[in-house]
Image (cartoon, helix red, strand yellow):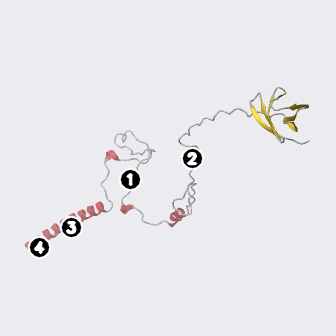
Amino acid sequence: MKTGIENKRNLIILAVLAVVLIGAAVYFVRGVFGGSPSPAPALATSSSGPSTPENAGTQTAATDANGHAAKKMPPLEKLDPTLHPEVMAGAESLEYSGKGRNIFSMNSAPVVIPKEVASVRPQPVVPQPPPGPPPPPAIDLKFFGYSANNGAKKAFLLHGDDVFIANEGDVVDHHYKVLKISPLSIQVTDLLYNNTQTLPLTQG
């Protein structure tokens, strides 16, 4: 009888140890593969339903900058590992429709960089020189004849409809002074503009 009681006591002790070991193993597995302690009551979030005065002081919703409530991911053992081909096919059928360069394509057109419209540094303004005086007008005389008698040279000049016969040093029409006479040309100075020009002999 004593041996049977001791065997029964040993079986009870073994059973208790087995239960403790199983509980410890379950707790360890849950901690490694996604198990986490329950959140504190002060950090509990409410995903739906209006707040009531009873839980207004104990529950606060954690929201981001856009006002969306944060959602806690479920443990790994509650996730559905089933693949959904229809969702994957929809994601694969998406096409890039941007206006810029596609960084995932080697054939994409490069981004057009706008050219510089104006110089960054302003260019100094160079002042333009003042315009010079206008050139003197042409002498309005026509040399059409020449004669030389006993060394005296004479030139026949035409000014409009007036005909003048001038020697070297004469002033024609109070305006032009004959400086030098030669058979083919004469030198005349415009006294108003102090301009000397050579007039060729013209025929006809």
Residue 138: percent from left, percent from top: 79, 35
Q: Are marks 1 and 4 in contact (CB under 8 Å)?
A: no
Q: Which residue is mark 1?
A: 72
Crowding around mark 2 (Cα neighbors within 10 Å: few <14, some 14 to 19, many 20+) is few
Which numbered circle lies on residue 4? 4
Q: Select label 3 or label 2 by which is in front.
A: 2
Separation of marks 2 and 4 at Cα, in angstroms:
103 Å
Where residue 139 sits, quadrant-wise, is top right
Judged from the image, the secondary structure of the residue bearing numbered disc 2 is loop
Judged from the image, the secondary structure of the residue bearing numbered disc 1 is loop
Crowding around mark 1 (Cα neighbors within 10 Å: few <14, some 14 to 19, many 20+) is few
Which numbered circle lies on residue 18? 3
Where residue 161 sits, quadrant-wise, is top right
Which numbered circle lies on residue 116? 2
Crowding around mark 4 (Cα neighbors within 10 Å: few <14, some 14 to 19, many 20+) is few
Q: Earlier in the sequence, mark 1 or mark 2?
A: 1
Separation of marks 4 and 3 at Cα, in angstroms:
21 Å
